[in-house]
Amino acid sequence: MHFNVSQLVRETGGSTREHPVQDRIVFRDNLIEVDGSVRFVRTDRGVWVTALLNTKVESECGRCLDPYVQFVEIMVDEEAISRLDPVSGVRLRDSLDPEENLVIDEDNILDLTGTARQYISLGLPMSPLCSTDCAGLCAGCGVNRNQEECTCVHDQRDSRWGPLLDALPSGETMNLSKN
């Protein structure tokens, strides 16, 4: 996702450009498609970047461990700082770290690939689910409860009752509903 902003950085502050985005980037060793739009606005230090991007990422469900495709929508809103003065070509900033700042390089190329990767990572859920009603894996036998019925007997004991439940004769249960 490389953009040539050489004309824009030579214009006055407030000048804008808009571009559609249809590109592929490598994310987690997979090639993914990124679609959307990006808008550039000239500032006194560089270019303000506003982008709305959409992509789909292969993920693994946190409950059933099945693979699925996660839709990710990201919004980029950052300033890209120019290393060179656009008119004279004099180096303005040597200490810009591309890991911390969006940087317009010496050829006036703005690379949004790394920024898109970071925002995609942030846009992924911490506990990915293939669906909201995913039943997950059985803790006893390991069967995927979305695909087949589990035959395990699940004794739901409230451990807070501990010794009192142990005092009951085997096979007898007590209704411990909350009031």
Image (spheres, rainbow, N blue to C red):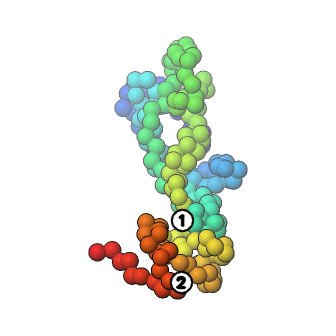
Residue drawn at x 36%, y 32% as measured from the top left = 14
Secondary structure at badge 1 equals loop
Characterize the local packing of mark 1: few (<14), some (14-19) or many (20 or more) Cα atoms within 10 angstroms: many
The residue under label 1 is 129
Amino acid type, callout 2: Ser
Is residue 69 visible in the rendered image? The answer is no
Secondary structure at badge 2 equals loop
Q: Position of residue 60 (x, y in %)?
A: 62, 62
Which dot marks residue 116?
Answer: none
For marks 2 and 1, give the one nearer the viewer: 2
Q: Position of residue 20 (x, y in %)?
A: 51, 50
Q: Position of residue 65 (x, y in %)?
A: 64, 66
The residue under label 2 is 170
Amino acid type, callout 1: Leu
Which mark sits nearer the N-terminus, 2 or 1?
1
Residue drawn at x 56%, y 34% as measured from the top left = 110
Residue drawn at x 67%, y 75% as measured from the top left = 141
Q: Is residue 32 left or right of residue 15?
A: right
